[in-house]
């Protein structure tokens, strides 16, 4: 099974001013492509911390997806940070710069700066915005604005397809997590290749737990979820 990490860049993300919806959206889209996310991180708009993370994490995974910091304001430093991570200069991609100048006639030189990509990069078109993304080795750099990020990912998502999709079974039960913990553990012991998760919450109607089982093996997933469903139905009421 292929692996991925997701890095979201932005002072607004790290500070909590803006929720990190990009990471959860990407993780959900990668699972059907057979890619398991091993880490999700957020860093501020600073060159060295981003470069240090990319240098360390990219060799550990099949794909490293980076979002944010591609605009034209002073804190948009992702292109510089990725160039630093790979130890290469930024170079203007001539055809990309020409296209940006033609599209943004009010300030063509401002837009052309988005074409200064790390040497060796492959530009990724931005269907909904201005600043292009790019890919260099196994690192894919996408915009921070969710709509632009999602459109750009959709255009290249087949590049991530890496085998059997990671399927999921989920149900919500009206119970405390402690009441079903033993059954969850037993399921994991019976099917060690299956990931079993439980996510408790408290509602006006009382406690509830969402139970999720995941695997890229359809047979294992079916067997584990069938056994667990029967066991949990004995122990707790379903929502």
Image: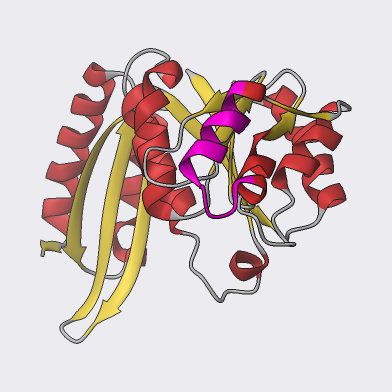
25 relative position to 66: left or right: left
Viewer-proximal residue among 97 and 18: 97
**Looking at the image, which residue is at 46% across and 52% down?**
22
Viewer-proximal residue among 65 and 202: 65
- Residue 139 visible, this orientation: no
Name which quarter of the figure residue 201 lies in.
bottom left
100 relative position to 147: left or right: right
141 inside magenta stretch: no
In the image, the segment drawn in magenta is: 95-108
Q: Main secondary structure of the magenta part?
A: helix
Q: Which color scheme does this rendered protein use? A: secondary structure
- Residue 82 visible, this orientation: yes
Residue at the limit of the structure toward the front, as seen here: 105
Percent x, y for residue 116?
A: 72, 35
Residue at the limit of the structure toward the bottom, as seen here: 204
Is residue 176 placed above or below 198 in the rendered structure?
Answer: below
105 inside magenta stretch: yes
**Looking at the image, which residue is at 60% across and 25% down?**
135
Residue at the limit of the structure toward the top, as seen here: 163
Viewer-proximal residue among 102 and 225: 102
**Looking at the image, which residue is at 43% across and 50% down?**
24
Percent x, y for residue 130?
A: 49, 45
Quadrant showing the C terminus: bottom left
Percent x, y for residue 133?
A: 55, 36
**Looking at the image, which residue is at 84% across and 41% down?**
52
239 relative position to 203: left or right: left
Percent x, y for residue 142?
A: 53, 40
Name which quarter of the figure residue 56 lies in.
top right
């Amino acid at each position: 099974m292929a692996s991925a990490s997701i890095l979201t860049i932005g002072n607004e993300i790290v500070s909590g001013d803006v929720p990190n919806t990009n990471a959860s959206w990407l993780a959900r889209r990668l699972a059907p492509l057979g890619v398991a996310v091993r880490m999700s991180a957020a860093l501020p708009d600073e060159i060295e911390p981003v470069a240090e993370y990319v240098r360390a994490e990219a060799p550990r995974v099949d794909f490293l997806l980076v979002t944010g910091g591609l605009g034209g304001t002073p804190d948009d430093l992702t292109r510089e940070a990725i160039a630093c991570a790979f130890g290469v200069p930024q170079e203007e991609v001539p055809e990309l710069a020409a296209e940006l100048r033609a599209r943004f006639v009010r300030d063509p030189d401002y837009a052309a700066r988005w074409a200064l990509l790390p040497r060796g990069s492959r530009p990724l078109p931005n269907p909904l915005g201005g600043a292009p993304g790019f890919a260099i080795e196994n690192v894919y750099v996408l915009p921070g604005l969710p709509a632009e990020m999602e459109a750009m990912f959709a255009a290249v998502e087949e590049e991530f397809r890496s085998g059997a999709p990671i399927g999921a079974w989920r149900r919500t039960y009206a119970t405390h997590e402690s009441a079903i913990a033993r059954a969850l553990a037993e399921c994991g012991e019976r099917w060690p290749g299956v990931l079993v998760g439980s996510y408790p919450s408290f509602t006006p109607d009382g406690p509830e737990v969402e139970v999720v089982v995941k695997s890229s093996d359809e047979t294992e997933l079916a067997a584990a979820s069938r056994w667990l469903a029967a066991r949990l139905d004995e122990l707790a009421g379903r929502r």
